[in-house]
Image: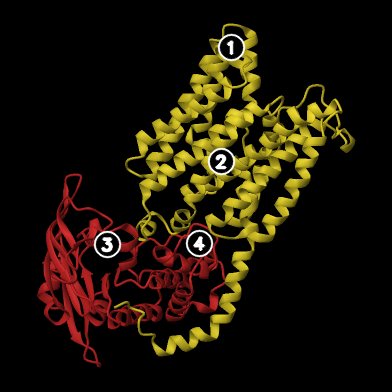
Amino acid sequence: MSPDAQPNAAPTVRAAGHTEATARERRAGASRAAPLNVILLLGILAAAALSVIAGKVWLPWNAWMLDDPRWLIIAELRFPRTVLGFSVGAALGLAGAAMQGYLRNPLADPGLFGISSGAALGATVSLYFGFAASALLLPTFALLGAAGSMLILALLAGRSGSLILFALAGMVLASITGSLTTLTISLAPTPFIASQIVIWLLGALTDRSWDDVSITVPAMLVGAVLIVATARSLDALTLGEEAARSMGIDQRRLQWLIVLGVGLCVGASVAAAGIISFVGLMVPHMVRPLVRGKPSSILLPSALGGGLLLLLADSLVRILPTVSELRLGIAMSMLGGPFFLVMLFRMRRQLA
Amino acid sequence: MSGLVATNIRVRLRDQLVLNDVNVRFERGRVTALLGPNGAGKTTLLSCLAGLRVPDAGDVRLDDADVFALERRARARRIGVLPQSSEVHWDIDVATLVGLGRFPHRERWGESADDKRAVLRAMAATDVAQFASRSAKQLSGGERGRVLFARVLAGEPEWLLADEPLASLDPAHQLDVLDQLHDVAARGAGVIVVLHDLTHAARVADDIVLLRDGRVIAHGTRDEVMLPDRVRDAFGIDVHVGRAVDGDRFVVPLRRSR
């Protein structure tokens, strides 16, 4: 017999009095994310339009004719760039929200796992061998690098399901792949290749084509599906590992889903745009106080927010009157660093 | 054999035997207190019984079914666990937190009417309904303890395994939690609770299991176990066991026994 089969008289009366208020509160909690998502979506539409129009060549609406020569710029350069800008931002925001939920640490960043540096190593190697000429090879190598990192992570930590081992393995992996990347740069056959690698690592969405989209976006989509599958387990982890396990969470399955989901999202993002930092760290933070919810209700707004942020940032670097286009990765770090400092100052005041 | 039964359980942690051939059977409808000094193996035994830790030897059966072979969520629906730690990591409101207790019952999308009712009942029973919309971060230690207890109740388990649920509660709320444990058992569930306070154990528990150094040294009704000799064997202290006005026993620790 279940313990609540017979309602005990007194508390039930009291519960009835609270039923309405509580139901209202709960609805409020559930719907807190909805308006935010709508606003973010509208913002994304506007930012996407801006991203297509803006650049060294401005493309007003009257350029949108198939027989207009500028249509080629729109169809072959601007559209893929807009799609990638949104996808990369969304993938990073989503991966960041999942990582923070999984590690139960608001300072966790998808870069922590060594997956993005693995992807960077893959891309670096392909540039080293001069494969940059082919649009398909560089992202493929980057994805392979990410996959290598994921495999090592999974072999190292995947069996135990232990969080600490997992985080440590990720950090060690990040430093190893990072040093291998530096090694590759220092061994570069020509100074040109070395500078090509360094510039690529700075992260950008310049001159991307539909080829880049067709390789990286499906990987991000698969990653996103895997991350969404972890949503409820992440909620249960709010009460700690032990409680989550007692509620029926399969820790190992969760860890696999996180490794693969975050790995695909982050790996594909690096493959598409190089290393773009701070999105995965910042966006969930900006969203969390607005939603004030479980980790699962932060996933969607984080993805939308990440997409919006990157669309805006990428439009901005094209609009800024710099001689050569400011690299997106640099722009994000310049935005993200100060943001993070301000956040820390605020947290300090809260904690004091 | 019905009930929750541990047979020849042995757990080794590094070089130490944390549980050494533990045989113990728990029944539904009763509150059983697990007592013993620090390091006696109470928490380890609890997590073996909950199916969360596979012992190195021996088995745990729930109504003759191997606990470790049960499907995770099915097991979680039947055995609710209130862990010792009271961590709450994100800024979620109390109703959402209690709702997490429905996790093993929930279908993929949304919560059912049953879920909502169970959550409301649990919040009412633990007297936390009035701060349903408050943030879990703004609760006092005692309030948080009650909210976490409500989380387990919301799962409506057949077995409730609680690891020191009285820690950080004031005396009034300690009594409340003990009453709730008693109510849960009275409604037919089996309750196994790790306690440190001997008087609380003597008052709330129907049965008492005494553990020392990974072994069960006594198991019986509270009248059989709550005796000065037994307590001295388990804890190495001399106690005075008296009768309160209501007839229940109370226990006063006097000194370490020589």
Q: Name the residue under label 4.
A: B109
For the residues carrying marks 2 and 3, which lies nearer the camera in this image? Answer: 2
Find residue A66 and report its horizontal and vertical position in percent.
Answer: 83, 31
Relative side of A191 to A55, left or right = left
**Chain to which mark 4 belongs:** B
Q: Name the residue under label 1.
A: A130
Name the element at disc 1.
loop
Q: Is residue A275 visible?
A: no
Q: Which amino acid does label 2 sit on?
A: Leu
Which residue: 46% across, 34% down? A171
Marks 1, 2 in one chain: yes
Which residue: 13% across, 78% down? B227
Whichever of labels 1 and 2 marks the residue nearer the N terminus, that label is 1
Dot 1, crowdedness within 10 Å: few (<14), some or many (≥20)?
Answer: some
Relative side of A251 to B62, left or right = right
Relative side of A241 to A37, left or right = left
**Chain to which mark 2 belongs:** A
Q: Do the residues labelled 3 and 1 touch (CB within 8 Å)?
A: no
Pick the front one: A133 or B256: A133
Residues under labels 1 and 2: Cα distance?
A: 29 Å
Marks 3, 4 in one chain: yes
Q: Name the residue under label 3.
A: B50
Q: Which chain is yellow?
A: A
Q: Identify the disc placed on residue A148.
A: none
Q: Which chain is red?
A: B
Q: Name the residue under label 2.
A: A221
Residues under labels 3 and 1: Cα distance?
A: 58 Å
